[in-house]
Image (tube, rainbow, N blue to C red):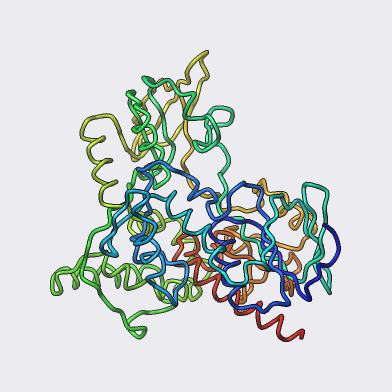
Amino acid sequence: MSGRSAYTHRIAVIGAGASGVVLAANLLRRLGPETEIVLIEKRKEVGRGLAYSTWDPNHLLNVRVGNMSAYAYQPDHFHHWLQTNGPRHGIGCPTHFCFVPRGVYGEYIGGLLHDQDAAHRLNILRDECVGIIPSASSVQVMLASGDEMQVDYVVLATGNEPGRPTVAGRSENPWAPGVLDRLDGHATVLVVGTGLTMVDVVLSLYRRGHRGPIVAISRRGLLSQPHQLAPAQTLRRDEISFGAPLSVLMRWLRDRIRTAEQEQSADWRSVIDALRPYIQDLWHAMSIEQRGRFLRHARPWWDVRRHRMAPQISELIKNLRAEGRLRIFAARIIAAQAEPETTKVTLRHRGGDVTETIEVGGILDCTGLPDDPRHSLNPALASLFAAGHIRPGPLTIGLDLAANGAVIATDGSVSPRVFAVGPLSRGVRWESIALPDIRDQCAELASRLAALVAKVE
């Protein structure tokens, strides 16, 4: 493939995980027959990405079904899909407060593209984008196969990527092929990170019959909280002090939670959920200094309450801890010595000089998404960084983007043709990894691109 297509306009979406597919589905709905959507993905399946490629039945969505529709204007879209398709997976979901396997959700996302009447305008390329060259009138896209194409607009939807190894040469990405298979089932396993990725890995080991101890550490040793049904709360915009110092905001949030618990039979979940519609505006109203303070001091506490476990998963983790098969505590690695079959790891516990040395059969890196996109192994991003077409976002989190989602170059200029959605936008939007937030981004960007196409016509 090279040059222009038979269509008047062409938009390339780089990445066909949840972000890319939801965006493509929105574009197909909003754009007319003169526009081709090219979805570029090196994986065999679309819609799954890293998050939804698992078929482990213990890997459940971390968001209730009622909040996981791909379309904000059709909040029951996924729930209705489950009524038809859930039974063949052995899933019954009578209410909106249920949590289904992520593999099933990946099937739902992938199916969005088949539901479109305009699916014939979708061109799915099983290839890898290795270079992007924007110009004033178009964007040249280079593929690993050697093909090139010229498009009007490019959207980066590359999703989640693994971070750098915590212990060079010894720690491994748990989702890399064969990593869990190589572990001795009776050996101690060290998991670095205590967030939701750790939970997934522990459950995978549990399902495989791993009998050895699992030790999970992080700087603070915090574990994600479980979902619970709680009375709904509402917050008015004028109740929130946008732009106030972080200490003031945190004090207000604690007071609001205390009031909800004492006077309205609610709990902190109700208040956190009521705050969600305002999170982006809160983030934008913070100074860079305030954002930095949030990341250093409040982020871990926020994350374990904002990104929760399904109730049944929380019970499994609770039982594993009670049985002594899983230990979770605050510590960091201060030394690692390689042995022929194992690694001796010395840990320093938080808050003192207490150290502990354990011999482990494997170290699994579950520290989450890397913040700095300059460390990305994605060749498309690397090409844009090398040419100065993109730069890291504030505090080197994600990409720096304009309000319309366009990337910003190293010289501060806003691209008229290259945009980004999903986790790459975390630096400017913060809440950009959960589907409810991603779907809003995709809908907004699809509207903007439709307006740009219409303006050209």
Residue 454 vs 369, above or below: the answer is below
Q: In this view, does 289 lie above or below 443?
A: above
* Quadrant of the image containing the C terminus: bottom right
Please indicate whether residue 42 sits to the left or right of residue 199 in the image. Answer: right
Viewport quadrant of the N terminus: bottom right
Q: Is residue 347 above or below residue 160?
A: above
Count of all numbered marks drawn on residues in the image: 0
Left or right of 77, for residue 447? right
Residue 304 x/y as whole percent = 35, 54
**In terms of image quadrants, where is residue 4?**
bottom right
Nearest the camera: 42 or 359?
A: 42
Q: Is 310 rendered above or below residue 8?
A: above
Q: Where is residue 263 in the image (x, y as percent from the top left)?
A: 13, 74
Q: Residue at x 71, y 85 (%)?
A: 454
Give the residue furthest to the right.
3
| Residue 389, position as x, y percentages in the image | 76, 63
Is 410 situated left or right of 18 in this image? Answer: right
Spot occupied by residue 20 in the image (x, y as percentages of width and height): 59, 61
Residue found at the far top of this picture: 340
Q: Horizontally, is 385 left or right of 420 in the view? A: right
Question: Front-most of 227 and 268?
Answer: 227
- Residue name at image x 59 percent, y 65 percent: 421
